Image: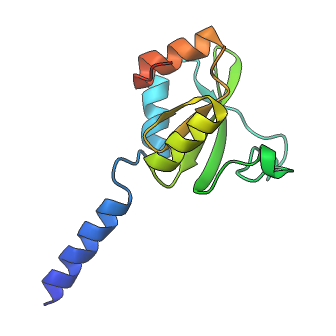
Amino acid sequence: MREIVITLFIILASCSKEGAVSWPSLRSRAQKSDPTFSIVLAEKIGGGPKCVGETPSLSYSKGCQKVIRVKVKDIDFLFVGFENAEQAKKEAQRLNQVYYHNWLIDEVRGEPPLEAFVKNTFGVSF
C-alpha cells in the first residue's frame, strides 16, 4: 500500500510541472550559447523586477513566479517564470513576445541581436 501511495504522489507531482524548465537549466543553456549572457543585479535588495507592477497593466498575469533581468551584448531583457507553459504562452501572446516552455522572454521583439540570440539558443521563432 505504501508503495502505491508513493508512486501516485510521484506521478501527480511530475504531471504538474510537465515541460517546465528550471532557471539553472535555462541560464546554463543561455551562457553556453553566448558568453556575454549575464544576470543584471538590482541596485538594492528587493529592487529588481517583480510579477506585480505598480498598476494592473504593468503586472504579469496569474502564474508568474519570478522575473529575472538579464543581458546579452549589453542589451537588457527579462525571463519571466510561470507555473506552466500554457500560462507563459498566454502571457507571451498578450504582450506580443515569445516563450520557451514555462518562461516568457520579454522585451526581445524588435531587438535584432536579442531575437537572434533567442532564436539560436531556444529555437523560438518570431
Q: Residue at x 79, y 45 (%)?
A: 57
Q: Residue at x 22, y 76 (%)?
A: 8
In this view, the residue in front, 36 or 59, is 59
**Percent from the top left, x then y, of residue 25?**
42, 40
Residue 43 sits in quarter: top right
Q: Is residue 3 left or right of residue 100?
A: left
**Percent from the top left, x then y, of residue 23?**
49, 44
Quadrant that contains the N terminus: bottom left
Task: Work out whether 30 lies above or below 22.
Answer: above
Q: Residue at x 75, y 53 (%)?
A: 52
**Percent from the top left, x then y, of residue 30?**
48, 27
In this view, the residue in front, 87 or 79, is 87
Q: Residue at x 70, y 18 (%)?
A: 75
How many numbered markers are drawn? 0
Q: Residue furthest bottom?
A: 1
Q: Is residue 94 left or right of residue 99?
A: right
**Percent from the top left, x then y, of residue 3?**
14, 82
Task: Work out whether 111 lies above or below 98.
Answer: above
